[in-house]
Image: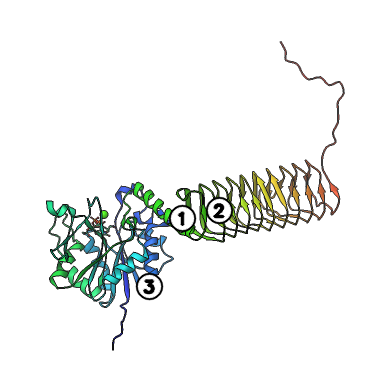
Amino acid sequence: MSSVVENPLSVVVLAAGQGTRMKSSLPKVLHTIAGKPLLEHVIKDAQALGATTVHVVYGHGGEQVRQALSAYELNWVPQTEQLGTGHAVQQALPDIPDNHLVLLLYGDVPLITVNTLRGLLAAADGDALALLTAELDDPAGYGRIVRDASNRVQAIVEQKDANAKQLTIHEINTGMLAAKAGQLKKWIGQLDNNNAQNEYYLTDIVGFAVADGVAVNTSKPMERCEIEGVNNKYQLAQLERAFQLRQARQLMEHGLTLRDPARFDLRGELVIGRDVEIDINVLLEGRVELANGVVIGPNTVLKNVSIGSHTRVHANSVLEESTVGAHCDIGPFARLRPQTNLANNVKVGNFVEIKKSDIAEGSKVNHLSYVGDTTMGMNVNVGAGTITCNYDGANKHRTIIGDDVFIGSDTQLVAPVTIASGATIGAGSTITRNAEAAALTLSRTRQMTVDGWQRPKKKS
Ligand code: UD1
Ligand code: CA
């Protein structure tokens, strides 16, 4: 009888580094890629792998780091003094039962993928020590993988401790590895710091595993960027771009038309229908839903919005915490602020700001207007330069506009005020009282002409 009993997985994430080269008061692992802390990317991978527990070894800026990730259930392990990677892992081991498989990740190596890690875990099968290694054209700075004549891994030698021959090795240690907790405890207990950096090198466990007759297996990442760490702002930007290109490629495989994947930024989640098009320099944040046939113009920002089918958002528009129906036309230069809900076939034109308002089907606000705290009916036409005066300096008030209302240009609607269905408001009016249904209301001084009036002349 044979049954494969999978060992529970414990993930250890090293995150105690100070990140001096970031030149920032923010702890390194809290700098973001796609709007999410570096450390959070790694934690999400650990969760996706089904880790029983995720242990985070923290040091510098500990409280801040813990707070930023308080939404996650994590075992926080302090490392007060940074005596090396071996010492760091040692801090977490007492919390991990011997039969657990331990996967070691790094809080500043955010682009590692679940697929690559599955390969690494598979390489640890049968009590082996599994190392994630890579072949690099320029291996400078990394620990080198030393193999014997039969290609078996013998040791990892750090750059600073390597001899001339070892320095020519191109296979490097990414630092990520997997092994049984019981074995790790034994090997880590054997570490010393007699080396060029006087650190407890985790990498020395490879020699101990070989001495114990334990197989040391290696696996490789799919992409180079997966193993890259962040040490400075330039590397942060490079990995941001790599991550964005990865997201862009996945979305394009699902049918999204991106005019230029190099000028696309998604900091959150994008849900798309068929035949969605996104032009250049678009920033999407939070959760964005774009239904079939939606077209997003260039230089547009969408944050937590849902947009119905065949709606077009033209260039330079900013939409936030809003829902937009189908077949709407928004922008260019439109701004939808939080709690705006547009029904189908609504038009919002250039230099129009809408806040906390519901606009029913077929209504149009085409030019230079502010609509705030408003409930607007169907087929309303709001003339250019119309403003809802929703704020009296202390409180906000609502404007109610019925169906089929026509509001002449340059009108101020002083809230609270109701414009009943079918009403017409004459251009240039300041409306302070409710307007009656199906009637013309206007407040405007009568036009007059002064006969024989002379323009003043300049005195000589
Ligand atoms: C380490 C590896 C090296 C590998 C390289 C990949 C060792 C001895 N060397 O070298 O073989 O090629 O990573 O980048 O492991 N950390 C702690 N506490 C500590 C020390 C480190 O949390 O006491 C964390 C750091 O924050 C960092 C990571 O561990 O995220 C790696 O530490 P670092 O000192 O940069 O190791 P390397 O010298 O790069
Ligand atoms: Ca390093």
Q: Which residue is mark 3?
A: 50
Q: CB atoms at circles 2 and 1 under 8 Å apart?
A: no
Q: CA distance from mark 3 to mark 2?
A: 35 Å
Q: Residue furthest toward the bottom?
A: 1
For label 2, the residue is: 277
What is the quadrant of the N terminus in the image?
bottom left
- Residue under label 1: 248
Q: CA distance from mark 2 to mark 1?
A: 12 Å
Could you tell whether 407 is left or right of 126 in the image? right
Sequence order check: which comes first, mark 2 or mark 1?
1
Rendering quarter of residue 13: bottom left
Label 3 or label 2, whichever comes before in sequence order: 3
User: Is the residue 57 above or below the residue 229 in the image?
Assistant: below
- Disc 2 beta carbon < 8 A from ligand 1? no
Measuring from the top left, give residue 335's x and y in whole percent: 61, 48
- Is residue 444 visible in the rendered image? The answer is yes
Helix, strand, or loop for circle 3?
A: loop
Left or right for 225, reference 268 = left
Amino acid at dot 2: Glu
The residue located at (85%, 36%) in the rendering is 446
Give, as a three-letter code, the residue at label 3: Gly
